[in-house]
Amino acid sequence: MTWKTAHRSFYYQGAPAPEDPVLEPAATALLCIDVQNYGLVLHDDPAERARWAPFHERMRGTLIPRLRGLQQSFRSAGIDVIHARIACLLADGRDRSLSQKMPGWNNLLMPLDTPASQIIPELAPAPGEIVVTKTTDSALTGTNLRLMLANMGIRNVVVAGIYTDQCVSSTVRSLADESFRVILVEDCCAAGTDELHRAEIAILNMIYCHVMTSDELRALMGLA
């Protein structure tokens, strides 16, 4: 099974296989979302640490090495790599959107210069790469990224990062609504559980984006 037939939701069972998208290097960018230190902190509570173990295994064993490799492929080909991260500009977080003030896990208070808000070293921006800071889930809604992409002539956005069912999903939907062509790289994303990850990529696939693996994307774009 390839990306053309995989990850289909109820709505697209039996639909014709999509054509290969044309991803011209000058009109394409890789957008890496929220791969920050806060996402890799291990819980002190043993029960919570065990509950989150599959996520950390996917991050270390799949997402980080494959996204690092994809970043290197894009950079070697001269294709833009862009980074988005969650951080608030005020120490008390008043500038955050409502979705980032909700009680519980999503209540992320991460001022701009704190260690938790920094992108992890393995996937850190190279010199000169764009980094946008957002106080919303969507990297498009919460920044001037839309304007920058338009100014750069970008029409195709390859999306990766965490969490598949939250900030990644919100960004993919925003991009699609603005008529960008979106590719979601399945093995370069993660959610809190594999079940949530699989469910969300099926929801997004074939309407808001095309879902591919990093190897399928490299083959399509002729990248090393």
Image (cartoon, rainbow, N blue to C red):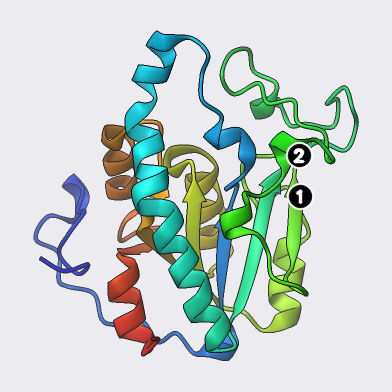
Q: Is residue 155 left or right of residue 158?
A: right
x, y (%) of residue 211?
32, 62
Cα gap from disc 1 to disc 2, whole angstroms: 6 Å
Above or below, 54 relative to 50: below
Q: Amino acid at mark 2?
A: Ala
Q: Is residue 224 left or right of residue 17?
A: right
x, y (%) of residue 154?
62, 79
The quarter of the picture where residue 126 lies is bottom right
User: Mark 2 highlights which residue?
Assistant: 87
Q: Is residue 25 left or right of residue 197?
A: right
Return the residue nearer the eye: 156 or 130: 130
x, y (%) of residue 144?
78, 60
Residue appearing at x 83%, y 26% in the figure: 93
Q: Of the two numbered discs 1 and 2 on the same chain, state the one appearing first in sequence.
A: 2
Residue appearing at x 70%, y 76% in the figure: 150
Q: Residues within 10 Å of mark 2 (few under 14, many from 20)?
A: many
Return the residue nearer the eye: 148 or 61: 61
Q: Which mark is residue 109?
A: none
Q: Is residue 200 something one can see in this rendering? A: yes
Residue appearing at x 59%, y 63% in the figure: 178
x, y (%) of residue 29?
57, 75
Above or below, 199 relative to 29: above
Tell me the element at label 2: loop
User: Mark 1 highlights which residue?
Assistant: 133
Tell me the element at label 1: strand
